[in-house]
Image (spheres, rainbow, N blue to C red):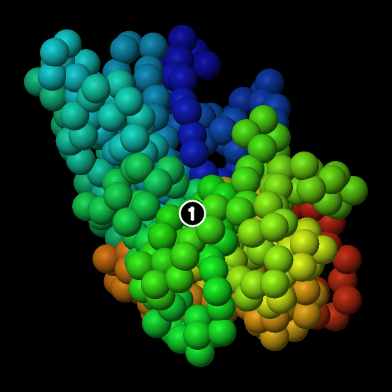
Amino acid sequence: MGGVTVALSFNGNIVNTQPLKKEMEDNFKDFIYNCDSDLVCHKFLLGYKQSKDIVAAAKGVMESLDGAFSVTGITGNGEFFAFKDPHGIKPLCAGHDPNTKTLAFSSETVSLDMNSFVRDFELNPGELAIATKDGFKRIQVIENPKHAFCAFEFAYFARPDSIFNGKYVYEIREQFGRNTVKEYQDVVKECDIIMSVPETGDDSAMGVHEASGLRWERCSRRHRYVTERAFILLNAERYSTIDKKINILGSKVAGKSVIITEDSIVRGDTTKVIIEKMRQAGAKKVYVFVTFPRIIGPCFYGIDMSSYGQLVGSRHNAEEIAKIIGADGVCYQSIEALVEATGKKTDELCLACITGKYPTPCAQKIADAMKRRFQQGYEEKGRIYENEEIQP
């Protein structure tokens, strides 16, 4: 575009795609939308061309885009920068190599560790950081009192060896496990052993073991070469993938009452298959301790659970879900306990998928409109925020 070039990488998801597509088509004659990165990049490029200023271009993106976006980029002039959406929904940190003075941005601290970089800081919501010869220049582009870091990062998405809020993620997940023991002591008294759904249930299993004194029996094993994530597969593929992915050591559960630790229940398919295998192996009772509270609404910000219909928790309570998946009980960690374990406050987290309260206005309007239609029997088609019929 007029000799101005920029390359961006982007983590997140944009909700108000329809009006942004129209704006980009009006300003770029060859614009083609393939993914949200096209919108982020072209919106930044439009502002950068007009202002020749990274700060102004980043501000234009922050003010125009509804959704989650952690962005890193470099201009044709060699300016290296990163910025985060005004709610800070996705992680984004900065660090440096003390030997070469190389500067880096990363979604999580673990990638800095793996490359022997020193972590310097986590970008604040609405902040822009620019790499200079003297280090990072930090600019608070937009002040937003409403922070909304994704709570699902703590339960599932983030690597356990990354650091958020001064704690390793695995330590927070262990606390999730201890919390469930505290909340469901009567269930714990009935059980003989703990089993985890590997690998995101492993850390919480350690916490359940510590708080309950029950043996954590490593009787579920994950096939390391089956890498598909079951909750994003098509229905026909999901069962066979789960069946291949998780192996149950039957003799270890036969005749026993078992606590399964699970990070979350989205559709319930993975847990259902595992419980079926345990019943076939002779398990006496099966309780599921779920560290992430019941998911009742879709995510608009980059986690692929984008409609009400695919979420078992949007239609059923814990008792009903237990019957659907074949468990003797489903025991969710409470929202209050989850928040406390993260070290953050309720108003510093995005809890939209478990409360129905979305931090961005477009997402809230679409969620409310689609929920009404879903309750009236409307058939959802694809991601609801891409449906032109319900754009606000």
| Residue 27 to residue 331: above or below | above
What type is the residue that disc 1 sits on?
Asp
Can you give x and y, in whole percent of width and height, for residue 269 in the image?
A: 76, 60
Q: In this view, does 217 lie to the left or right of 30?
A: left
Residue at 46% across, 25% down: 8
Q: In this view, does 66 lie to the left or right of 147?
A: right
Quarter occupied by residue 179? bottom left
Can you give x and y, in whole percent of width and height, for residue 112 in the image?
A: 29, 29
Secondary structure of the residue carrying numbered label 1: helix
Q: Which of 292 and 32 is in front in this view?
A: 292
Q: Nearer the viewer, residue 328 or 10?
A: 328
For label 1, the crowd category at 10 Å Cα-Cα, with few meaning under 14, some 14 to 19 and many 20 or more, is many
| Residue 174 to residue 45: above or below | below
Quarter occupied by residue 265? bottom right
Residue at 70% across, 35% down: 226
Residue at 48% across, 61% down: 216
Q: In this view, does 314 lie to the left or right of 290?
A: right
Q: Answer yes or no: is residue 99 visible.
A: yes
Q: Assign the C terminus to one quadrant of the image.
A: bottom right
Task: Count the labels in the image.
Answer: 1
| Residue 236 to residue 344: above or below | above
Can you give x and y, in whole percent of width and height, for residue 141 in the image?
A: 26, 45
Q: Which of 96 and 252 is in front in this view?
A: 252
Q: Answer yes or no: is residue 16 visible.
A: no
**Most distant residue in the bottom direction:** 186
Q: Mark 1 points at which residue?
A: 202
Can you give x and y, in whole percent of width and height, for residue 61 in the image?
A: 43, 42
Quarter occupied by residue 245? top right
Residue at 21% across, 16% down: 102
Q: Is residue 131 left or right of residue 313?
A: left
